[in-house]
Amino acid sequence: MRRAKWPASSSTPVATPLQPSVVYASRDPDALDAQYEGTHPGYTYAREAHPNAQVLAGLIDGLEGASGGIVVGSGMAAITVALLGVLKAGDHVIGADQLYGRSLRMMTEELPRMGIETSLVDATDASAVEAALRPETKLILIETLSNPTLRMSDLEGILALRNRGVMVAVDNTFTTPALVKPLEMGADITIHSVTKMLAGHSDATLGYVAAKEADLNARFADLAATLGVTASPFDCWLGERGLYSFDLRFARASETAARLADALSDSGKTTKVLYPTRNDHPDHNKATRLLAGKGGNMVSFEIAGGRAESNRLVQALDGIAFAPTLGDIRTTVSHPPSSSHRAMAESGRQALGITEGFFRVSVGCEDADDLISAFLKALDQA
Ligand SMILES: Cc1ncc(COP(=O)(O)O)c(C=O)c1O
């Protein structure tokens, strides 16, 4: 059977077409040559580039104030591209000591295996980062807000260290470009797990990385094609669809999160509530200044007791998914001691304040009153 022809149409689709083609046919060798040389636009092979990833990257570029960022197959793929795109054997990299678990594994296991030295430091204090600088330090990798204690990195202080000849990469997943635009603040690289708030529906695994310098973006695109960390066109299509409602979802979820934090605290049934813009948060001043008074959609809290009380709380949270993720349009609750921080020694968890009664909530877009009353009821039963 011969290949079908796409029907001609003088109108264009309103929804972005989904293009799953792995490979693209060219008119003749001259046309293919022109594409490879970059003198004529065109796709050749989806691992190198495809339209759905390019469309999504362009939209996130717009949010981040970037140009030429790329979309890859996961947030970890974006972090890998950023690290391997900049570092080589003999270099030294500083990471925040509360990075996402797999980012920590990159720092403690994979990079050292490649001859890249790493140090982990407290990123809430730029002087601790400065003290770890070495002549061979090439890059500092931080997250805007740490997981799950929602501590705010000393962004301004760390970005000022760029004048010591180091690059700064910021994982902006928790704050999103609605609160922080790292490149506009002076960072060299911004990174997202698009899987989370940007795509927003727990149905697409995606990452994004953008550098300020055009040459570095070209390097990232080339490296991503070599590593094969391509995002699936369908995931990109879903991510794009989710992204169109990102600002509405995030604004609503953040408003509810601020109310939930206050309600949890006022309930008298929690021993601690962490929300960046609350007066009792350790980084309240920094967060209020850098996040324009908005605290985002993540709230953490602690209840008294041990595993039995935590089990009871989760079982009583009717209709709220207990799942170690964030950024879904619906609220999810995670329990770091049994998920993200389970591999950490008890003493390390205690030092961070992650006790058996510690929970992290990714607030979604449900009715705020319903959500708050669901939490208060569950607290009563715990
Ligand atoms: C802050 C942060 N960065 C990166 C990642 C990794 O993203 P992905 O799961 O899309 O690989 C996560 C995942 O939870 C995260 O929380």
Image: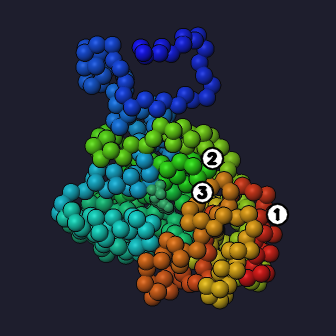
Percent x, y for residue 228? 33, 44
Q: Amino acid at mark 2?
A: Phe
Please identify the quarter of the rendering in which residue 91 is found: bottom left
Percent x, y for residue 218? 31, 39
Q: Amino acid at mark 3?
A: Gly
Name the residue beneath numbered marker 2: 246
The local crowd at label 2, few if under 14, some if 14 to 19, many if 20 or more residues have their Cα within 10 Å, is some
Percent x, y for residue 331? 68, 61
Q: Which mark is residue 369?
A: 1
Q: Is residue 161 visible?
A: no
Distance (Cα) linking label 1 and label 2: 22 Å
Residue extending furthest toward the front: 1
Quarter in which the C terminus is drawn? bottom right
The local crowd at label 3, few if under 14, some if 14 to 19, many if 20 or more residues have their Cα within 10 Å, is many
Q: Is residue 20 left or right of residue 87?
A: right
Name the residue beneath numbered marker 3: 327
Q: How is the image coloured?
A: rainbow
